Amino acid sequence: MRIIGLDAARSLAIVLAMSSHVFADVGLYAHMSEPLTRVAGFAFQIATPTFILLFGTMLEVVYRPRWTTRQARHGVAMRLLSRAFQCWVLYALTILTLTLTDDGYSVPYSTATILFMGNSPYTEILKFYAIVLAIAPILLWIRARTGLLPLAVAALACHAAWPLLSGLPDVQNDLGAPTPVASLVQFLTGFGDLPLAGPSVLHGLTLVIAGQCLGRYLTGRSAAGSTDPLADPGFGRRVRALLVGGAGVALIGGLFVSVDVIDGLADGSLRRDSNPLYFATGILSATLMTLFFVWLIDIRKVGSIGAWSRATFFGRTSMFTFAWGNVLLYLVAPQPTDVIGAVAWTAALLVALCVMSLGFDRAARRSTTVATTLTRLRRPADWLAERLLWGMGRLRAA
């Protein structure tokens, strides 16, 4: 049985992420008071950790039970690798849009960006997922062989070593590496002096592992083979216990956090520095938001499952929304001159994003023609994934 609360949390994370892009694109922050800007910035910064953490939860809840026989493992790995290729293609299309609309994206720079050696304004999450989806089968393999403890220890060690790693020589300014190479290194590791538009692969993986741990906690002892964690009598008790405990930690932490830290979280500077405080706050906030929706929908049964399923369409159209929603922002690029224009553009773009995603979701589920077309469009990615797995199998056998 599907845990609808996870879909609701994922949908809200996408709404927050796209709202932050719209606010930035329209320039609405310039017309907002400082306290309101801080609150909005903090709320928007929760989006990315939530989305990545829920990917880890999905690995544990959905894919972990399927990681059984050799044939089943092959199917899981192929699906994840295919989606990795799909994310990369969508990311490349968004960069091509910038090449046509933004003078700052020359053909050489756009080519480097498509190859992970540059940044885009809003679609770095697609680049991140193109890598992490490809790594996911390795995480599942390690999980099956050793359990989650080694992964959790590695994630904690990554953040514990931040003071040491952040003091390493910069590959561009200190070691003389060209900008594209420095940008690639920073995207993979999170360390360097260049702007970092989102979590690095290294630090983002710690969010994925945190999500796996959350998934293991939710599924309890049913994780090894059950596809219905909601049938576990202890499911509700575990959710309530962690929700109350997490809320207590958040309240106590809030008493000691400084305004500078809040500002660093709200303006993204802690994220750009790969600061452990950003990831700790992100994990805590994402966990609380996820548990609240699971408690509300799957345990308390507030609202019908059908209504919630219809309302969480953003969670089913995440790749479409992040790709084509941001393409819309690149193409429109509004420049309002007053607060009324900024608010009007913000409302119009948010409505347009909702209509686009809802329309795509309904068409994909109800139209045989659309579903068949999407299947055909995915075939090249499926073929590449199959070829890659075949090649890896040949190397392992050699």
Image (spheres, grey):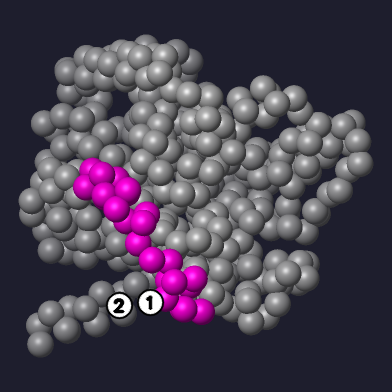
Can you give x and y, in whole percent of width and height, for residue 29 in the image? 74, 35
Q: Amino acid at mark 2?
A: Leu
Q: Total of numbered circles in the picture? A: 2
Camera sees residue 104:
yes
Q: Residues within 10 Å of mark 1 (few under 14, many from 20)?
A: some
Disc sitting over residue 384 in the figure? 1
Labels 2 and 1 touching (C-beta < 8 A):
yes
Q: Amino acid at mark 1?
A: Leu
Can you give x and y, in whole percent of width and height, for residue 223 in the image? 16, 37
Name the residue located 42 percent from the left edge and 28 percent from the top edge: 285
Q: Residues within 10 Å of mark 2 (few under 14, many from 20)?
A: some
Q: Nearer the viewer, residue 68 or 195?
A: 195
The residue stretch that appears in magenta: 155-178
Q: Nearer the viewer, residue 82 or 246?
A: 246
Q: Secondary structure at mark 2?
A: helix
Q: Is residue 98 above or below residue 10?
A: below
Q: Is residue 120 above or below residue 270?
A: below
Q: Which residue is mark 2?
A: 388
Between marks 2 and 1, how big is the CA–CA gap?
6 Å
Name which quarter of the figure residue 224 lies in.
top left
